[in-house]
Each structure stands twice: as structure tokens, then as C-alpha cells.
Image (tube, rainbow, N blue to C red):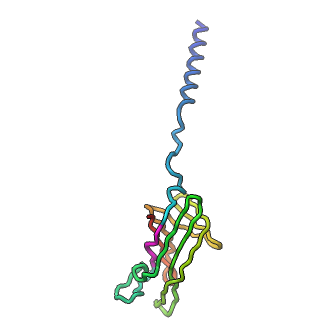
Amino acid sequence: MKNETKLTLLIFILTSFIFLSACSDDSENNGPSDIEAASGIYILTELNVNPAQDVNEDGIASTNLLNEMPCISGNLVLKDDGTYVLTLTGVEVTSITGDLFFISCSPRTVSNSNWTINAGQITLFGNVTTTPYVLADNMLTRATGEDLPNLQNVVYQKQ
């Protein structure tokens, strides 16, 4: 009987070992990585200021300067190798007096460097500065919350 107990115990241990070693690791993520999911082409959709401005003098002030100035454009290409290319025709803001500002389009610029993503925050690295964006629902948003002559926020939509 002793040998039968030992044999049963040995079979149980071997079966348990085989069963446990055959299980797959459910923690594996077969979906795209964060950097792959965030990679793509983003188009500038909002360049918001406060207070609202009527730069095109049509009688309708807007907080989104893209509604006021057709010369503003931008696209951001986030590559899955961790590099980016940003092409931007933005704005230059000059304070005149009080709440009056002269707003004009800036020359087109092209910049490129590296980017990272961490917990939904994308950081673009430049020569001197880093620029953080929040990624949510295929929208990249950089919010500063500042009034003119600075920007409230910048929004890019993934294509």
C-alpha cells in the first residue's frame, strides 16, 4: 500500500506540474503598444485664445483662431519609431494696448525630433523645450490656460 500511495502522489505531482506549465500567460497583451496606437497623422483643428478675437473683422469674434485666419495650418506626424515631424503655420501675437492685440500668421516651420508616451501623455522633445500633450479620443491637446498674448490650448485630431 505504501508503494501505491507514493505512486499516486508522484502521478499527482507530475500531472499538476504538466497542467501548470501548460497554462499560457494571460497577462500578455497582443494588442498594439502605446506608441503604435498613438502613432499617426494629426491635423491642427483648434488654436484657442482668450478673450475671443475678430481678426478677420467679419463681426463674429471666435476663441478658435482657425475660424478667423485661414493661413493657420498644422500637421503632426508621430512615427512608430519614436520620432515626429511637425509642420506648422501658427500665429504671432503683439499686444497693442489694453485688450487689443495684433495677430498675424507666422512663417511656416518644420521641426522634428523624438517623442514619448506615458499614461496618455505625449511629450514632444525639441532642441530646447519639451511640449506635453494629452491624448484622449484621438485628440492631442496642449492646454496652457493662459490669456492673450498666449494661447489657451492647441488641439490636433488624428486622421
Q: Residue furthest bottom?
A: 97
The quadrant where residue 127 appears: bottom right
Locate the N terminus by quadrant: top right
Q: Residue furthest left?
A: 59
Locate the C terminus by quadrant: bottom left
Residue at point 49% right, 71% down? 75
Look at the magenta stretch and give its main secondary structure.
Answer: strand
Residue 2 in the image: x percent, y percent?
60, 8
Residue 72 in the image: x percent, y percent?
46, 79
Residue 15 in the image: x percent, y percent?
55, 22
Q: Which residue occupies the foreground of this view, 8 or 82? A: 82
Indicate yes or no whether the magenta region holds residue 45. Answer: yes
- Placement of 54 over or under 12, stated as above or below: below
Indicate yes or no whether the magenta region holds residue 28. Answer: no
Magenta-colored span? 42-48
Residue at point 53% right, 42% down? 27
